Image (cartoon, grey):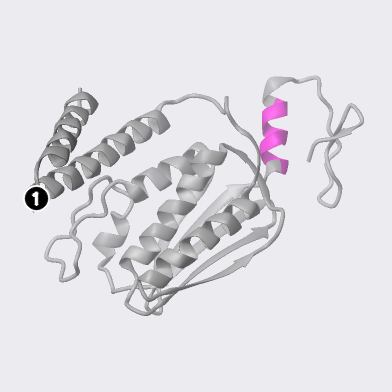
Amino acid sequence: ELKTPIASIRANAQVLQNKIKPNRYLEHILSETKRMENLVQDLLGLSKLDEKQGDINFSDVNLSEICEELTLNYESLAYEEGKLIESDIVEDIRVLGQDSQLKQLITILLDNAIKYSLDQSTIRISLTQEKKKAVLQVSNPSPSYSQEVMDSLFERFYQVEGSHHSFSSFGLGLAIAKAIVTKHKGEITAIQDHGNMIFTVHLPIIFLNLLIELMLRSNTITLQVCSSTPVVINSEVVA
């Protein structure tokens, strides 16, 4: 219901753009249409994440490689804003998940950090392993927020009332990030510490995810598990 009229507006505006001289009002229409298309896409994606379905498309994902790839991509974007990105990523941390969703999660956190960090600041991203969890952390110097704002960061379209900053809404990004983390059986938190906004994501590493999945699928599989050894099923190493 929303995609079709928006696509129609964009198509007609593009036709006009090719027939008339440059016009700032037309450019504004195209810009806002693009923003609406992105918003509708986000709403559709969030709706799909809300669906209670299993891990049908989940596979072995190297979270370290995704972090390194996206950090490299965002370094130039941060530089254009007069900001830097520092990374500390442990190699070969793997989770059971959907590659595209995990990329979207990290994209949201990095984009949020660049957008809302203080001028000429340094954004930090780290990925480590603590026990059986992958721990992703993105932090940036930021304005101080009230506890009410902090408690509502992951709400959809949360409005910051009386804000003196250049934004009034957190939109859908953080709500989508939380939905992705929940879909991957993880947790996401946000805290303020010494002038920094810190987002921390805990995700089960593939070892535990695979173990849970196999135990749910069959009661006949016997696993010998040791924290220092891989899981072996039918003489094949699986994690």
Point 66% across, 59% down: residue: 130
- Does the magenta portion include 208? yes
Determine the image quadrant of residue 152: bottom left
Q: Nearer the viewer, residue 152 or 176?
A: 176
How many discs appear?
1
Location of residue 218 with respect to 213 vertically, above or below = above
Quadrant placement of the N terminus: top left
* Furthest residue in direction right, as rendered: 235
Q: Is residue 43 left or right of residue 68?
A: left
How far across and down, in percent of the image, does residue 8 sit? Answer: 17, 27
Please give the range of residues in magenta.
207-215
Residue at 60% of width from left, 32% of height from top?
Answer: 58
Nearest to the observer: residue 196 or residue 123: 123
Left or right of 111, for residue 146: left
Foreground pick, 82 / 225: 82
The residue singled out by tag 1 in the image is: 23
**Displayed quadrant of residue 117:** bottom left
Q: Is residue 232 within the magenta segment?
A: no
Quarter the C terminus occupies = top right
Please state the horizontal and vertical placement of residue 65, each as a whole percent of the image: 64, 53
Q: Is residue 5 visible?
A: yes
In front: 71, or 97? 71
What amino acid type is highlighted by mark number 1?
Asn
Q: Secondary structure at mark 1?
A: loop
Main SS of the magenta segment? helix
Q: For this view, does 68 lie left or right of residue 76?
A: right
